Image (cartoon, helix red, strand yellow):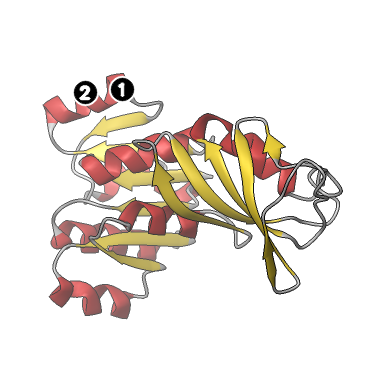
Amino acid sequence: MKIIVVGGGKIGEHLTRVLSKKKHSITLIENEKELSQELASNLDALVINQDGTTMSILKEAGIDKCNAVISVTGDDKTNLMVSEIAKSIGVPKIIARVNNPGDEELFVKLGISLVVPVTQNTINTIENDILDSNVRILSKIGDGKATILEVVVEEGSPMEKQKGNILVGGTISAIYKNGTITIPDKKTKIETGDVLIIVAQDAHINSILKSVKAKN
């Protein structure tokens, strides 16, 4: 997916880092020059040092061709303006951070895809909205270097009929099947429709997600 992130603070930086690792094409817009330079040197993303509420800058970032716009600045007016522009252009998915609970209604009335209050789960909530419905991030562990995932095994996927709980870069810690939770071992057979709880190293998340998806 091509995604524009507006706001290079802690949430914007971490979100850009996580999504770029998942092979999304990210453009990050940050207004502060020094912060932009630091982000550009540390992230695998295009960083634009400009005002993200300006139509010409958003067009330069490719807003007319992007799949999602995520505005996570610390200013609700900025996030609302970015969302309004994205809405007017017809961006399929618009996600906005809300800093003041009293402003949430404004975003909802605009019809934003996802309005996210600032909590410790903000990043997980946004990631889950970007991911498909068969994948859910439950938690980040190990200083963000590992992730606990809930995934559904699709019919025809490489994971189907696999035996065992050890994956490359991860471990299946539990399986929910037919209303029952089991702890798998090396003899456990994975089947279509199984809901797996996986502890995965972030560097291996993409390959693990591919293994539970149906082959095209």
Residue contact at pointers 2 and 1, CB within 8 angstroms: yes
At x 87% / y 48%, what residue is drawn? 161
Toward which corner of the image does residue 121 lie, by quadrant?
A: bottom left
Q: Which residue is mark 2?
A: 38
At x 33% / y 45%, what residue is drawn? 5
Left or right relative to 173: residue 215: right
Q: Can residue 206 be seen here?
A: yes
Q: Position of residue 109 (x, y in %)?
A: 30, 80
What is the C-alpha distance between the residues marked 2 and 1?
6 Å
135 w.r.t. 162: above or below = below
At x 69% / y 36%, what residue is drawn? 166
Q: Which residue is mark 1?
A: 42
213 w.r.t. 91: above or below = above
Q: Nearest the camera: 122 or 171?
A: 171
| Residue type for callout 1 | Asn
| Residue type for callout 2 | Glu
